[in-house]
Amino acid sequence: MSGGGGDGEYDVNINLTALLDILTNLLFFLMVGFMSSKASMELDGGMQLPTSTAQLEPKKAVQVTVARKELRVEKEVIANLRDGKVVAAKTQEGKIEPLLQRLQQVRKDKNVTGPEADILFVLCDKDTPYGLLRRVMMTAAEAGYPKFRMAVLMQ
Amino acid sequence: MSDKPRGIGAGLFGKESGTSYEVYLNLTPLMDVMSNLLFFLLASFGATMVAIMPTTVPTVSSGESAPNDDKKEDAVNVTMRADASGITLKCESDTIAPDLLKDMGGKIPRVGGQYDYKQITTVLNNIKQKYRASKSVVVVPDDNVPYEVVVKLLDAARDTRLIDTRNAILFPDVVLSGIATHDAEGNLLK
């Protein structure tokens, strides 16, 4: 490195060890925080959760995702969505039949008892019309899940 | 262990070499990798700060409620209807005469195309100040109201964060209505 104002050249060695130390600490802190997240959730590329002043930490439960283009239970696609409506899926009295059947199956398979048994964790895109969400919740209530944990982003 | 000082090049286990070397590790590439990882993790960490809002659906009980001789504090149930024109608040109670509750609710029109969330909190806060045992609010949004707006309505009803930094709890029990179609016996609700 050449220093101005003189004939001589100076080789400056910046001591990065201390900075590296701080970065390592930060890195480990973030990695531990990242891993200890109680509920893992995968959001679609285009899906956005609404922001809220809610502070409650997420807890694991059966997960239903109302994305922009599809409706999922856990990771399985149940129905396709277009313009806030269910495409090519049987509906009866407002209920979404494939969702009802899948949730009843999940409830039977998991065989959970106690207060956590009837709670559903719902991830819903912020632009979803309430009419669609209402039908999803109504179907879930029919399948034995009348309580919901609505996922939101902390403000 | 001997207190005799070791000379240059003398290791713990005897003389290793007559020459000493000063080694400068080039930490710059490692720094580079770590900085990248750090920024990636910071970005992901912010995106996963997820909270939950507990909600329930209305339930119907077919049996008559058991008589309760305990004297209860007066409480009101608030119904908040959201439609294209604005918010309509209505109060009901089992123990208070409807005439007394008539003036507590009312219509809150939209301001600049949006619901007036601060005004909603203010009205609900007035109700809560008068009837402190009140806990439940039933939110009835129109089908075309986006989920984001429903969440804001629930936020406005839950606490006084929008109008007061002290953040008092208003109506913690939120029920989203228009969901239950059948009662416990499977009869279609009208």
Image (tube, coloured by chain):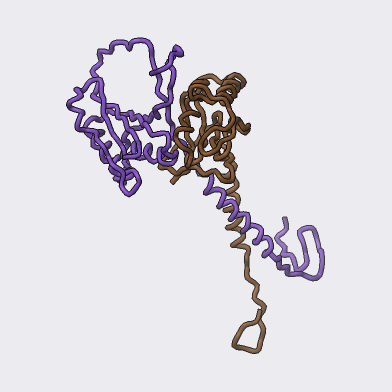
Chain colours: A brown, B purple
Q: Classify residue A153 as left or right of residue A46.
A: left
Q: Residue at x 37, y 38 (%)?
A: B153
Indicate the position of residue B179 as horizontal and vertical percent values: 43, 25
Number of numbered tags placed on the structure image: 0
- Rendered location of residue B49, percent (x, y): 50, 44
As drawn, A13 above or below B119: below
Q: Quadrant of residue A22?
A: bottom right
* Residue nearest the viewer, comparing A95 with A37: A95
- Give the answer, above or below, for where B29 lies relative to B74: below
Residue at point 59%, 88% (across, down) = A5
Q: Position of residue B121 (x, y in %)?
A: 30, 40
Say which residue appears at 20% left-offset and 24% top-offset: B98
Left or right side of B103 for A13: right
Residue B177 in percent (x, y) is at 39, 28
Residue, far front: A88
Which quadrant holds the N terminus of chain A? bottom right
Q: Nearer the viewer, residue B9 or A138?
A: A138
Q: Is residue A17 above or below residue A35?
A: below
Residue occupying the far bottom of the picture: A7
Depth check: give the residue in front, A138 or B35.
A138
* Image-based side of B81 in relation to A27, left or right: left
Determine the image quadrant of residue A20: bottom right
